[in-house]
Image (cartoon, grey):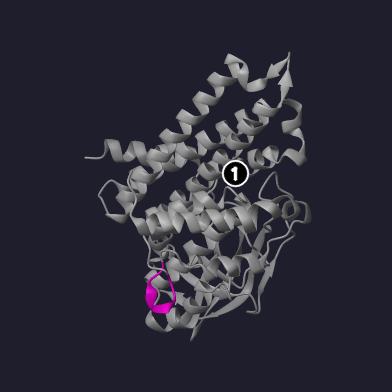
């Protein structure tokens, strides 16, 4: 797919930052369990704090294909930081796209600069794939809502300053869900212990709990009952971004495997001199190129608001994240026993990419979305 000169410049800028500012520190961040706020703010200075957010309040006003190019490059340096930035972008876009003028002016300028960091709160202990069954309640009391309930698997819990929360304002199924911006300092908001995870270890993940947490009515995003619609709208772009993170991480793993295979000698010759390795590398490259093509196509459709955009976003998310995990695992295999060691960094990529097949809608749910769209009418 041909890119404009601006898109190429944006991708090159992201690649340079990834190479110089993310890749050298990714291992340390994982070992320390550290999300670097300064790095997020430096990314925001490049315009990556509100990539698809409108320009009125400091966003870059770019398209979904632009965002995919950015996250693909950033994830070559650190999947964990790139993926977290994608979540911040989704939450920022949602406030800017659906909030009223007062709410947008209050929060969006500080989000696009990463002065404030945002998390997204949809999943609950009893509501994962069946997100519309969420139980967290928001009861109107004068000029506030009182929130009670809990969210689970929240990236940035306790680290972020704002939380975009989906809560139930009526019993009318998906139409009974509303969206709110909850500040970290609001009384009644608390956080569980930091989860010990397989991957994404640089970013904190924990429960977010609401115990009579009072949120001003002015912090509701849009009208009551529209929250689930906003959540689903945000997920199309979120799925593309997380797929891009898989693509970039897998590309990094492939390049590491190529470098290692050229240097590693067995039976008197380089590992890459064996046809079995060559065939594996050829398959990895072919699969990544196919994934990249589908991802870019889906992003283009979302930019064009094509009628089949949601189907293509689901197809891309499913295919790219499955492919990325397979390619990263194959890269580890080429490294042999050394691939299992943290010093070679491939095993971190394998662990980081695995969750991409689960979040933003499991890949099984992606198949449901695609098949339903195929069979409708």
Image quarter (top left, top right, bottom left or bottom right) of the C terminus = top left
Q: Dot 1 corresponds to which residue?
A: 355
Say left or right for 199 vs 146. Answer: right
The image position of residue 112, as x and y in percent, is: 50, 72
Residue closest to the far bottom: 143
Write the start and end of the magenta stretch as one range: 53-59
- Of 162 and 58, which appears nearest the observer? 58
Looking at the image, can residue 204 be seen? yes
Number of labels in the image equals 1
Give the image quarter of residue 317.
top left
Q: Position of residue 175 (x, y in %)?
A: 38, 62
Name the residue located 70 percent from the left edge and 44 percent from the top edge.
198
Q: Closest to the observer: 370 or 288?
A: 288
Given residues 144 and 285, the one toward you in this image is 285
Relative to 249, say whether 88 is above or below.
below
**Classed neighbour count for the residue bearing mark 1: other residues with Cα under 10 Å, few (<14), some (14–19), many (≥20):** some
Secondary structure beneath label 1: helix
For the point 38% across and 82% down, the residue is 101
**In the rendered structure, does residue 57 fall within the stretch colored magenta?**
yes
Task: Please indicate, yes or no, whether residue 178 appears anywhere in the rendered image.
Answer: no
Residue at 57% in and 43% down: 249
Front-most of 203 and 328? 328
The quarter in which the N terminus is drawn is top left
| Image coordinates for residue 227, horizontal then vertical, percent | 42, 65
Indicate yes or no whether the magenta region holds residue 97: no
In the depicted structure, whether residue 12 falls above or below residue 136 = above
């Amino acid at each position: 797919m041909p890119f404009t000169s601006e898109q190429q410049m944006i991708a090159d800028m992201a690649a340079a930052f990834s190479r110089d500012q993310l890749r050298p520190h990714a291992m340390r961040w994982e070992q320390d369990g550290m999300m670097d706020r300064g790095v997020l703010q430096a990314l925001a200075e490049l315009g990556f704090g509100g990539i698809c957010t409108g320009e009125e309040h400091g966003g870059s006003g770019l398209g979904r294909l632009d965002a995919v190019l950015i996250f693909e490059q950033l994830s070559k340096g650190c999947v964990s930081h790139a993926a977290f930035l994608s979540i911040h972008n989704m939450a920022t876009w949602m406030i800017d796209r659906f909030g009223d003028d007062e709410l947008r002016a209050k929060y969006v300028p500080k989000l696009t600069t990463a002065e404030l960091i945002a998390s997204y709160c949809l999943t609950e202990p009893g509501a994962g794939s069946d997100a519309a069954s969420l139980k967290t309640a928001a009861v109107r009391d004068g000029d506030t809502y009182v929130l009670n309930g809990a969210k689970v698997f929240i990236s940035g819990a306790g680290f972020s300053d704002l939380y975009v929360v989906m809560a139930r304002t009526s019993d009318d199924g998906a139409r009974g869900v509303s969206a709110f911006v909850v500040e970290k300092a609001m009384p009644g908001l608390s956080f569980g212990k930091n989860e010990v995870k397989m991957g994404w270890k640089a970013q904190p993940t924990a429960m977010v709990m609401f115990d009579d947490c009072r949120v001003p009515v002015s912090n509701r995003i849009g009208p009551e009952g529209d929250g689930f619609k906003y959540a689903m709208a945000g997920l199309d772009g979120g799925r593309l971004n997380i797929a891009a993170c898989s693509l970039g991480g897998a590309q990094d793993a492939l390049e590491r495997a190529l470098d290692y295979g050229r240097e590693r000698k067995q039976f008197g010759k380089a590992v890459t001199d064996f046809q079995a390795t060559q065939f594996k590398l050829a398959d990895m490259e072919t699969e990544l190129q196919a994934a990249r093509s589908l991802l870019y196509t889906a992003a283009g459709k979302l930019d064009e608001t094509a009628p089949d955009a949601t189907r293509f976003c689901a197809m891309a998310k499913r295919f790219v994240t499955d492919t990325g995990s397979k390619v990263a695992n194959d890269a580890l295999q080429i490294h042999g026993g050394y691939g299992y060691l943290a010093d070679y960094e491939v095993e971190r990529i394998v662990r980081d990419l695995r969750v991409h097949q689960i979040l933003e809608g499991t890949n099984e749910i992606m198949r449901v979305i695609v098949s339903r769209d195929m069979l409708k009418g």
